[in-house]
Image (cartoon, helix red, strand yellow):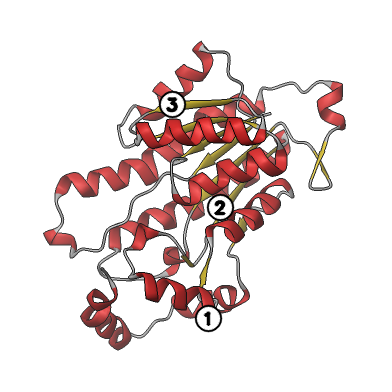
């Protein structure tokens, strides 16, 4: 099996690549805009877990990135069994003070590229014919499917939060888009899932190290290792969406009804918690 992981050079994407190689023994097509780091990751995973790895440098925020990546796979006879759309960016800014290029970058990366990747690779998965040997394989106790897609959303999809208005809106798109096409892909033996975690212990959000440690200790934040382990199991079991963590699951309905005064207080103080 071949797994395509975007954003694979660091953070959550690196964890997806690592666990797919270590625990599921899949070959890897790793994609990132960090060329040097990506090649190091590919070399290390190939050496440590004995899987084939390909490091493919690409800027997935370009409007034609999905088409170019799909063509690269076709030209090199690469059949993608598992697609992990993890590449993402984050920034906290007043919308009218945010550079237009940053807005465009996030919209392209989180919305356009993800939607196109699902369209192109999803169709290829639908049209695939598994061999009898492949049909007999089981993953996480379930019969192997024609293909698997995992899209990274976020709990912020349910938040009306100033400062991250572009981020949470794109994550809301990913969540609803993924759940919608789950119904379309399931009859064709293809699984797709939207993972919507709360806080994840990475450098993406710019929290100070001491606050990151505290958040993990209080289980407000989850480590990338635990998140990815849960995400892959749920993907292989055919779930359409998941928000890991009981506290996060419990808090989700409350996020939709956050009082205005609390948002204004958050706006005033959130800068103190960033580096």
Residue under label 1: 218
Q: Is residue 55 something one can see in this rendering?
A: yes
- Expressed as whole percent of the image width and height from the top left, the position of residue 105 reads 26, 43
| Marks 1 & 2, CB-CB < 8 Å contact | no
Nearer mark to the viewer, of 3 and 2: 3
Q: Nearer the viewer, residue 7 or 187?
A: 7
Residue under label 3: 56
Side of 170 where 165 appears, left or right? left
| Mark nearer the N terminus (3 vs 1) | 3
Side of 177 where 101 appears, left or right? left
Question: Image point 43% across, 26% down: which residue?
Answer: 56
Question: Image point 38% across, 75% down: which residue?
Answer: 210
| Marks 3 & 2, CB-CB < 8 Å contact | no
Disc 1 crowd rating (10 Å Cα; few below 14, some 14-19, many 20+) is few
Q: Nearer the viewer, residue 66 or 3?
A: 3
Residue under label 2: 194
- Expressed as whole percent of the image width and height from the top left, the position of residue 36 reads 36, 32
């Amino acid at each position: 099996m071949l797994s395509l992981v975007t954003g694979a050079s660091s953070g959550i994407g690196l964890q997806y690549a690592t666990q797919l190689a270590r625990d599921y023994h899949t070959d890897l097509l790793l994609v990132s805009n960090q060329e040097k780091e990506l090649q190091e990751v590919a070399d290390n995973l190939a050496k440590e877990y004995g899987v084939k790895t390909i490091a493919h440098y690409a800027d997935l925020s370009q409007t034609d990135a999905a088409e170019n990546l799909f063509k690269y796979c076709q030209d090199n006879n690469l059949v993608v069994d598992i697609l992990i759309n993890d590449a993402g960016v984050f920034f906290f800014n007043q919308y009218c003070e945010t550079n237009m290029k940053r807005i465009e970058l996030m919209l392209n990366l989180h919305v356009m590229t993800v939607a196109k990747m699902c369209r192109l690779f999803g169709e290829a998965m639908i049209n695939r014919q598994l061999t009898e040997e492949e049909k007999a394989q089981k993953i996480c106790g379930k019969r192997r499917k024609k293909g698997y897609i995992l899209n990274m959303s976020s709990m912020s999809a349910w938040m009306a939060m100033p400062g991250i208005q572009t981020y949470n809106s794109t994550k809301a798109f990913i969540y609803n888009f993924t759940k919608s096409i789950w119904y379309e892909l399931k009859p064709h033996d293809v699984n797709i899932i939207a993972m919507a975690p709360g806080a994840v212990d990475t450098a993406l959000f710019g929290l100070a190290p001491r606050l990151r440690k505290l958040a993990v200790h209080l289980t407000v934040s989850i480590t990338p290792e635990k998140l990815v382990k849960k995400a892959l199991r749920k993907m292989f079991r055919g779930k359409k969406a998941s928000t890991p963590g009981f506290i996060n699951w419990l808090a989700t309905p409350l996020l939709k009804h956050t009082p205005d005064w609390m948002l204004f207080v958050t706006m005033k103080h959130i800068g103190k918690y960033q580096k």
